[in-house]
Amino acid sequence: MSGAVLIALAAAIGNLLQGWDNATIAGSVLYIKKEFNLQTQPTMEGLIVAMSLIGATVITTFSGPVSDMLGRRPMLIISSVLYFLSGLVMLWSPNVYVLLLARLLDGFGIGLAVTLVPVYISETAPPEIRGQLNTFPQFTGCVGMFLSYCMVFGMSLTPSPSWRLMLGVLSIPSLAYFFFTLFYLPESPRWLVSKGRMKEAKQVLQRLRGREDVSGEMALLMEGLGVGGEVSIEEYIIGPDSELVDNQDEKDQIKLYGAEEGLSWIAKPVTGQSTLGLASRHGSMANQSMLMDPLVTLFGSVHEKLPEMGSMRSMLFSNVGSMFNITENQEKHEQWDEESQKDDEHHMSDGSGAESDDNLRSPLLSRQGTNAETNMGPPTSLSMRQGSNLMHANGEQASMGIGGGWQLAYRKDEKKEGALKRIYLHEEGGAGSRRGSIISLPGDAHAEGEFIHAAALVSQSVLRADSLLGQQSIEEAVETQPDAVTKRPGWKALFEPGVKHALIVGVGIQILQQFSGINGVLYYTPQILEQAGVGILLSNMGISSDSASLLISAVTTLLMLPSIVVAMRLMDFAGRRWLLLATLPVLLSSLIVLVIGNVISLGAVMHAVISTISVVVYFCTFVMGFGPIPNILCSEIFPTSVRGICIAICALTFWFGDIIVTYSLPVMLTSIGLGGVFGIYAVVCALAWVFVYLKVPETKGMPLEVITEFFAVGAKQAARE
């Protein structure tokens, strides 16, 4: 997956430039005020800082729909050009009005990068590491801030610091960003599929995944173009068609076709109410709450934490059946569904603590091939995935499904002639002794009873039965019906229940993030620390108050980097929701301590120490959760066909909140002081925790298309309640 990692790093340079600009304006505004005599004009001071936010807001209005038309890559190229031009104009700026124009151009570049980089990374990253890769923008942004603070601090030590040079240096790293976007970044494969450019999308996926066989993911990307429709939850017992077709009553069987040519299974529906169905109606035992959104418990049933195992794993349904049920003889094949039940009871009674998180990423079936191949006899060994590789018995790499332990399959729609049902499958929790290791089976009849118990999300496919079930390749299937696949749903898709529900989550978390005060504090960190009296801490070193605040800002930013690294490690393991719920109380506590330190008279030195520590904890905690996760979630929860429009709506919310906070902060500092400002932010953080607990689901490790299906199911369930 190194291709996807390098692509994400290259794209995240756009956020490095944003961080660079944030820190530069925070430091240079100290000198801009002196040159233009703005000490008594806080409104103009706030406008200089906020002008880039106004530019970002304006460009964001168009960025989503335009990126849906032109592509993600051209918009990132334009962003790099705008960064470069704004740096040159800021270097020249003869007066405050030209500076405002330069800041507006800078905002255009920032708006495109901040809005589209998370979308681009989400659309190119594998599900298993999507959260980690989407934390790169936060990391590179902090790197840019640190480098910029170091630069500004060094310039502040000179006899005549030049704010024009501080701001103009932005043009140099923007050239590197331009080079990478123009010559290295490919177009998003999901966008290419949405335009019917299948061959290009396949080539990009092969480059990103480092393998030739990407047919399963190609099918997934096309299915992602379908918005809305009826989604049902079903359960199956599944086995290879070559083993079951001759031994079972065909009237109770459904033939499932895989996205890869020649792959098919026989599935038997399981009757009765599933655990997932119960969770969607009543909530899980661990998350019972009358106020909690049913969507949260629905997603939570996928990522349930078992107390006796202490690890995250898949819990779509209760443990009814294992990954493989190995029978002793041919007669037991006739009772394969009953045997799976008995096998599960045995595993549940074991209560083994040896289960690992590899189970969440296990393949449904590790055998693939044509009927001719499967009829040649059982393999000498059956391999399960280790890490990210799924191997055949002969050692060749096979299909990896669609990621996160999910498989895409199809079946004929009995109600519509020529129509297909798409089925997202996930195997249920298996044996505690199975740890993703290789299970070797002897080459006799013992290897013939491989069945799994799987959960299924079933909805209408965008493909037709006559093409895909005719054993055409995915590309050929689309070429026979390009209009049906690439037809855009338009604005009316925004009113689909799942999309509306996702917009509530996305817009809500963006509002709360901004009014927690992060960008206001970020832009004015040097002034806040100067007002807190940090100059006292460094007075013995002969450093001025301005330089001292810049130095502490640089150190604070440096301390944020390891915090982001920790968030990277936890994003795809503990999950987005867990990180938010764990870090928001710490964020709230740091704000309360900061308020107390400014309300109670503790002396100049103690006041400076408490303020500095509180700001450092505030920043470090923020970048672990509330910083990157809102953008990550917003890039994950919307369907491909309307992702650009929905992202633009969420981004507009982000920038409007940013403008209000940034523009009002100088006035608020003057009127209610530092303690009052942080008191307001503390109240918002408390409200944010409640919102996350009740409304924000866990999306780790799930393909984007599966996430949108779950939103459709959860939204309709919530509407019924």
Image (cartoon, grey):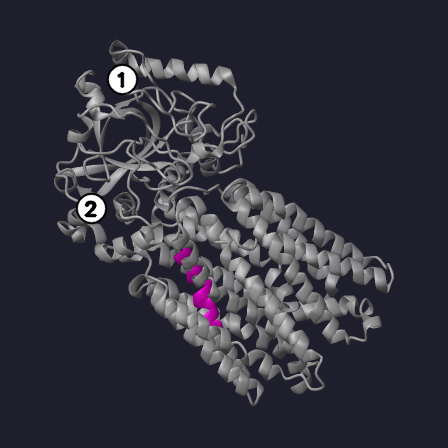
Asked if the magenta segment contains residue 453, the reply would be no
Tell me if 120 is positioned left or right of 533 in this view.
Answer: left
User: Residue 480 location, x and y as percent?
Assistant: 13, 49
Tell me if 405 is positioned left or right of 546 in this view.
Answer: left
Tell me if 180 is positioned left or right of 268 in this view.
Answer: right
Residue at image location 28% in from the left, 33% down from the top: 394
Residue at image location 30% in from the left, 40% down from the top: 397
- Please tell me whether the stretch drawn in magenta is mainly helix, strand or loop: helix
The secondary structure type at the circle numbered 1 is: loop
Residue 498 vs residue 594, the one in the foreground: 594
> Would residue 249 be seen by someone viewing this image from the given angle?
yes
Mark drawn on residue 474: 2
- Residue 428 found in image quarter: top left
Which numbered disc, 1 or 2, marks the residue that appears first in the sequence? 1
User: Residue 711 location, x and y as percent?
Assistant: 39, 42
The secondary structure type at the circle numbered 2 is: helix
Q: Residue furthest top?
A: 331
Residue at image location 40% in from the left, 59% down from the top: 7
- Residue 664 found in image quarter: bottom right
User: Residue 224 location, x and y as percent?
Assistant: 30, 47
User: Residue 714 location, x and y as percent?
Assistant: 40, 38
> Would residue 487 be seen by someone viewing this image from the given angle?
no
Mark drawn on residue 214: none
Q: Amino acid at mark 2?
A: Ile
